[in-house]
Amino acid sequence: MTEKNTPDIIYTTVDEAPELASASLLPIIQRFADAAGVSVGTRDISLAGRILATFPDHLSEAQRQSDDLAWLGELVKTPEANVIKLPNISASVPQLVAAIKELQGQGYAIPDYPETPGTQAEKEVRARYDGIKGSAVNPVLREGNSDRRAAKAVKAFAQANPHRMGDWSAHSKTRVAAMSGGDFFSNETSATLSAPATAKIVHIGADGRETVLKDAVSYPAGTVVDATFMSAHALDAFLADEIARTKAEGVMFSLHLKATMMKVSDPIIFGHAVKVFLAPVFETYGDEMAALGVNPNSGLGDLMARVKDQPNIVAAIEAVIADRPPLYMVDSDRGLTNLHVPSDVIIDASMPALIRAGGKGWGPDGKEHDAVCVIPDNSYAPVYDETIRYFKETGKLDPATSGTVQNIGLMAQKAEEYGSHPTTFEIPADGVVRMVLEDGTVLHEHAVQAGDIWRSASARKAPIEDWVNLAIDRQRAEGCEAIFWLDANRAHDAELIKYVTPILEAKGLADKFRILAPREATRATLETIRAGRNSIAITGNVLRDYLTDLFPILELATSAKMLSIVKLMQGGGLFETGAGGSAPKHVQQLMEENHLRWDSLGEFCALGESFKFLADVRDNAKARVLGDAVEAATQGVLDHNRSPGRKLGQPDNRDSHYWFARYWAEALAAQTEDGELAAYFAPMAKALADAEGAIVSELAAVRGGPADLGGYYHADKAKVAAVMRPSATLNAIIG
């Protein structure tokens, strides 16, 4: 599908801190790339951009925006794809509503988000918005499986400059709580299709009435198709029990989900937690709150905003919270609890942070305390449970001596998109849910009750086989321990093992790999890296997401510095730049005091790989020289401690970009593979070095006061450029 004028490299336009950093970094990249005849263009996958692209019929011609996500979705299916993908917002409903209001305030006549659509028109608007919610971008772009690891320079720097780890006590009261039954894990069924099939999902009520929940779901032969449900009754009972137990233990209550990636299921689970935590309030004032538009799925923050003029309800809420165990805080200074906003509850960020801190989280009093970590579903809760048990037994990990964990993740073609697919439903009434094939075969069947969460997901044969072969290649390259994190007692994993084992045996490699359930794999991996050795975790999609935060945060203090390569199945390359979970706090700091602590090291790593990939597929020697020089520049940033500081008064993201540009230019001027590039960059390298004092002074001069971006979700480009490129001297050199 590629057009003749498609840039050699696509650099995505995104949101929050990564996008602010791009305003400073991208002009540098484009200037350097242009010297080698490499074009670098942009495509907009930001939340605001996707909203505007979804409602062209509500906008003027000048306001309309192309559907860049759809365009990229086609590009990644071609051998020509070379995409650098930065972290974007996976929007919860509160984030989506906030973005809509901001755009409306800027003159875009897009419709409101219908919380409870009634008319057909409202239902159509809601359906469009639902396509934007949650992890809507990654499944479109990830037409390949994931190879994610710490770059050698990054790992070496972390070992030489180990970050602080909290001390673990054998007497810590921190623990993980998961359901004893009735969850997705215990109810899962799975089957591998022997032939292509089309299925429908139907709900048959107790009265015999059949409702089609989803029709015409097509699968190729060899697809692993799962179905399961979480019992709402069992969930509520579990939550009530854990709230009482947590109070008795004298520790904090915390909930850990992923309402962004699991955009259908997890906001519902989150809502159950809010409702059970405030059960006496809902019992007394439920009807009144419903009339005010309260939806517990949107969180305590939205609830409080809707009832703020109802003193009786506010007083009742305050009384219940005072009687409950203290809540784990997202932001103690601002009074934001773990139950305030569903998108703030991101398990792959929250659990590693707590584990790194020695099992401590921030409480309402602004102090650190032990916490009960509620992770309702047992599919992956054992990973965190075993990690906490291990550190209680052995003490904290030493980043200076620990080995590293690489990850090979199954994610191509929407593999294992649990709770995100349009095949996840909140059940309207008691009855049975069936997945029925076109020939009448009932593939899956579950007896359900009203309020249960039923879901189906799948993984196709070609991505599974590609995943196994990618793992084989990575193990061959590294020669270290390699573990498939698969539980033979879990229905889905058992089907995957039927693919894995024959491939390994056919290649004579079964002795190079182990297959362990997540709990056992967790302990084995922790023991390996504590001994200073390396391990490769070969996982499904969700564990890929969780482990590529857990282990990097333990090893490096952050997951934003990981090298993430997606080898697209049609031959292209997708290079991801790290995690964006902390990006909102970075933006808040910039807006308050004009200091951006976002570290672009992930972008540097992805950029080098992108150039080298371009060199290989286009036989472009100059691109390889650029890529090698990027690695030298990244090493320079690390060796000379030029990464951003967290606090005002320290160098920030913009300083790191100056040093990256300088080291990049110096590396290009010094290299001998391409005399033309060396001659081109020598004057630039000298100019950047000579102007160091002026540039550093100009960057420092703007920090300390508020920064006007002209918006949060849809910032003003000119204002952002003024904030992020404040050095006239640097701009004159770069252009």
Image (cartoon, helix red, strand yellow):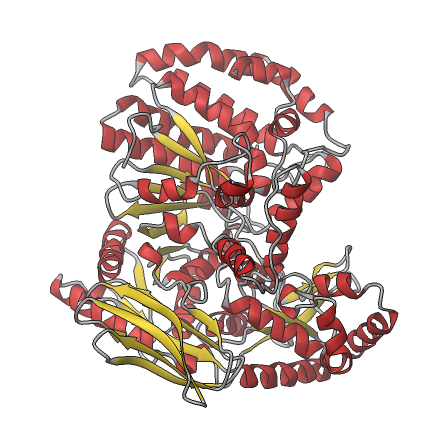
- Above or below — where is 65 with respect to 485? above
Res. 148 visible in picture: no
Question: Which sits in the foreground, 252 or 536?
Answer: 252
- Above or below — where is 427 with respect to 554? below
Horizontal relation, residue 633 to residue 4: left or right: right
Residue 341 spot, x, y in % from top left = 65, 61
Residue 398 spot, x, y in % from top left = 52, 57
Residue 135 spot, x, y in % from top left = 47, 55
Residue 314 spot, x, y in % from top left = 83, 70
Classify residue 171 by image quadrant: bottom right
Horizontal relation, residue 22 to residue 166: left or right: left
Q: In which quarter of the image is the N terminus?
A: top left
Res. 35 visible in picture: yes
Seen from this angle, which residue lies furthest bottom? 207
Q: At 55% across and 53% down in the image, what residue appears? A: 91
Horizontal relation, residue 278 to residue 219: left or right: right
Question: Which sits in the foreground, 68 or 613?
Answer: 68
